[in-house]
Amino acid sequence: MSGSTTHQFKENAERQLADEDLRQALTKSKGHFTGGRQNAMDKLPEFDALRDKSRDIKEHVLENLDFYLETYEQNVIDSGGQVHWARTAKDAQDIVLEICRSVGATSVNKGKSMIGEECDINEALEANGIRAVETDLGEYIIQIRNERPSHIIAPAVHLTKAQVEQSFRETHTHLDPDRILEEPPTLLEEARTVLRKKYFEAEVGITGANFLVAETGSSIIVTNEGNGDLSQLLPKVHIVLASIEKVVPTLEDASTFLRVLARSATGQEFSVYTTVSTGPRRAEDPDGPEEYHVILLDNGRTGMLGTEFQDMLRCIRCGACMNHCPVYQSVGGHAYGWVYPGPMGAVLSPSLLGVDEAGHLPNASTFCGRCEEVCPVRIPLPKLMRHWREREFERHLTPRAARTGIRLWAFFAQRPALYRWATGLQMRLMGAMGRRRGRFSSVPLAKGWTKYRDLPAPEGKTFQQQWAAQQKLGRS
Amino acid sequence: MVANRDGILDDIRRSQGRDGPIDDQRAAELRARMASPTRNLLPARADLPASEVIDLFQSMAESVFATVDRVADMSAVPEVLTDYLKRENLPAQVVMAPDPSLDDAPWSDQPLLEIRRGVPQESDMVSVTSAPAAIAETGTLAMFSGADHPSTLNFLPETHVVVLPVDRISKNYEDVWDLIRQRVDAGEMGPNERMPRTVNLVTGPSRSGDIEQTLLLGAHGPRRLHIILVDTDETA
C-alpha cells in the first residue's frame, strides 16, 4: 500500500470510473454530506462570520508560527509531556518506533490520523514486528482490505456494505461462517466486539490532533465513535502525531474552529467527542496514559510558508471541498493516488510529494469554484491549483501535445486578424463537414476529448462573428 | 532531534524574512493575547435567560439522541436511575465515579441497586458520573479527569448516566474554559496547577457513519447517554 500512485492519475481515474461499486457508494454518500452541511449552516446565522474569523486566526498563527510552536512545546514539557520534532515522514517513523521500543510494545492502537497515513506509520510498525490496529471503523475496514483511505473524514466512503461484509468474513475467520452479517448494524456490532478486545492489549495508543493549543500545551481530537479516546486512555503511552500548522493560540481560538469543523464536515453541530489532552496522567488520576508524547511533523510544510501556497496551511481537514467536488464525486479518492484526495489534495500533494509526482492533480478540476465556496477557512483552492498548473508548465512537465497546442493557440491569439481569419475558416470547414450528422465522433488532435463524447458540429460562424452581427442589430 | 527542531524553526523564520525569533515587543503582545484570552465570535443562540438556557441544553442534547430526565432535587435521583435501568432492560448494577457531589443522593433508598465506586472494568454495563459543567449551545457535557472522575467511565460501559445539577449548565464552550482557569487558579484542579489531564466534551452517545453513511449509535463508546437534570434552589 505504501508509496504514491499519484503520477498515474489518469489511469487511476479511468479505472475508478469503471468501478460499479464505487459509483453506488459515491451516489449514496454525496447528498448526505452536502445536505448535512447546508442544514447546519441554515441553523447557525453566524456561520459565515465564523469562517472569516477562522481564516484570520490561522493567518495570525502562520505569521507567528515559530513563536506559537515554541510556546506550545514549553507548555507540553511543563505539564509532563515530551515533544519530538520530525523533519520528514521517516523521522516520524523512527521516533514512533523508538518510543514503542522503550516500553517493549508489541501492539499499538491507532485513532484516526491523516499524519499517520502521510508517514506510513502502520507499515513502519509492522515492518518492525509491532502490530498496528486501526480502531476507527472506517480505518479498520480499509486496514483489513489493505487500502488507503479514500476520504479524509470518511475513509471507507468508497465501499458498499456488501464489500465490508465480504472483508469481515475473510478476516474474522474465528466467527461462525453462517452468521448473518448483511446490514450495517450487525457489521458495526462485529467490529465493536473484535476491536474491544484489542483496546486492552495495546501498550501504545497513537492519535492525531485536530488542534494543538499553545496556551495550555494541549492536543485536541474530535471523533464520533470514541475510539480515539479509548486508544489514548487505556494504553501506557499516548503518542500524538501532528503537523506543525495545527497549533492555535488559545482554547477560545480552538472553540471558533470547532464551531465550523463538524458543520463543514458531516453537518453535525458538534462532534460527539471533543477531547482536550494535556500531558500524562497525574499522580491522583485513576486512569490515563503514563507517558504523553507529541511528534511535530514538518514534511515539506515550512517550504509552503511565505509562498503562494501558504494559504493551504490553513486547512482544518474537514473534507467539505471533496464532498462538493464534481471531479472527486466521479473518480473517488483513490484515483488521487496518495493520502489527500479532492481539491485540498490537488493543492497539498504537489507541495508534499513534488510537482513531478503530483503535478497531474491540479489539472483534475473543472474550476467550478465550489471547493472555495464551502471551505471553512476560505482557502482559494482554484487559484492555488492554477498556480500549480503554471509551475507544471514552467517546468516543462505538461505533455508535449498540450504544450504545442497552447503555443500554437498563443501564436494566433496574439495576432487578432490572423486569429479571426483562421477560426472563421475552421468553423466554416467544420460546419460544412459536420452538416450531415450534426456531430463528430472523432477530431484530429482531440482524440482524448472525443473518446468519451461527440463534438457537436459548429453551425458555421465563430463567436466573434456572431457577436459582431448581434452588435450591428443593436442586440435586439 | 535537536537538529530537526532548530531546522524547522529556522525555516519558518526564513520564510518570514527573519534571522531569529520575533522581537521582544511582538512576543510580549502575543503572550498577553494568550494570558487573557479574548472570546471570538459567540453564536447568539445561547444568549438567553437562565431557565431557557437549561431548555436549550435539553433540546440540543435530545436532538443528538441523548435521553433526558429532569428531577426536583438530588433525593429523586436514585429512583429515577433505577427506573431508567429497568426501562432499558439493564442490570441494576452500576460503576459510579468517586465524586463527592454524587454522595448527596440517598442511594440506600434503592437496596437492589448495586453500586461500585471507581474505575470501570470490561464487564461493567453502566456507568454513573456527574459532570462539572455543560454547554447549552450544542447540548454538550464537559467532564474533567481527576481523582473523583476516571475518564474511562465516559467511554467503556455501554450506558453512561450523567447526573447534572442545572446550575452547572453554561451557555458556550468559552464558559467552561474560564471555569477551568478559575479552578486551576484556586488550586482546585489538583496539585499540578494545570489543566486536568483530560477534558471530555461529550455531545450525545457514540456513533459512526462509516458504512454507507448510515448513522449507527454505539460505535466504540456508549450506546446510550442518559442525562438526569437536577433542579437547584435558584431554578426550582
Image (spheres, rainbow, N blue to C red):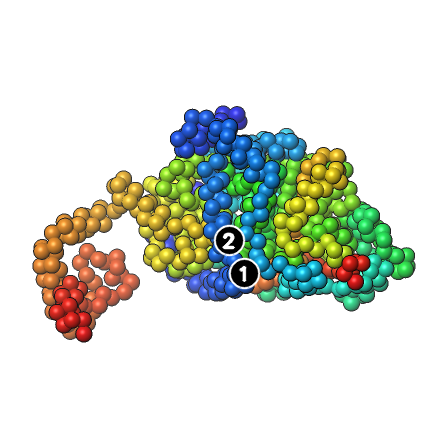
Q: Position of residue A187 (x, y in %)?
A: 61, 60
Mark 1 secondary-structure assignment: loop
Quick check: B160 above or below A233?
below
Q: Which mark is residue B28?
A: none
Q: Left or right: where does residue B35 sit relative to residue A10?
A: right
Identity of the residue drawn at 63% across and 64% down: B63
Quick check: B232 above or below A474?
above
Q: Amino acid at mark 1?
A: Leu
Q: Left or right: where does residue A174 sit relative to residue B189?
A: left
Whether marks 2 and 1 lie on the same chain: yes
Q: Earlier in the sequence, mark 2 or mark 1?
A: 1
Q: Quadrant of residue B74?
A: bottom right
Q: Position of residue A69 (x, y in %)?
A: 53, 34
From where the camera sits, is residue A472 visible?
Answer: yes
Mark 2 secondary-structure assignment: helix
From where the camera sits, is residue B199 visible?
Answer: no
Q: Residues within 10 Å of mark 1 (few under 14, many from 20)?
A: some
Q: Position of residue A453 (x, y in %)?
A: 27, 65
Q: Left or right: where does residue B177 sit relative to residue A354?
A: right
Q: CA distance from mark 2 to mark 1?
A: 10 Å
Identity of the residue drawn at 41% across and 57% down: A373
Residue, disc 2? A50
Q: Amino acid at mark 2?
A: Leu
User: Which image quarter is the C terminus of chain A in?
Assistant: bottom left
Q: Nearer the viewer, residue A311 or A17?
A: A311
Q: Which mark is residue A44?
A: 1
Tell whether label 1 touches label 2 (CB within 8 Å): yes
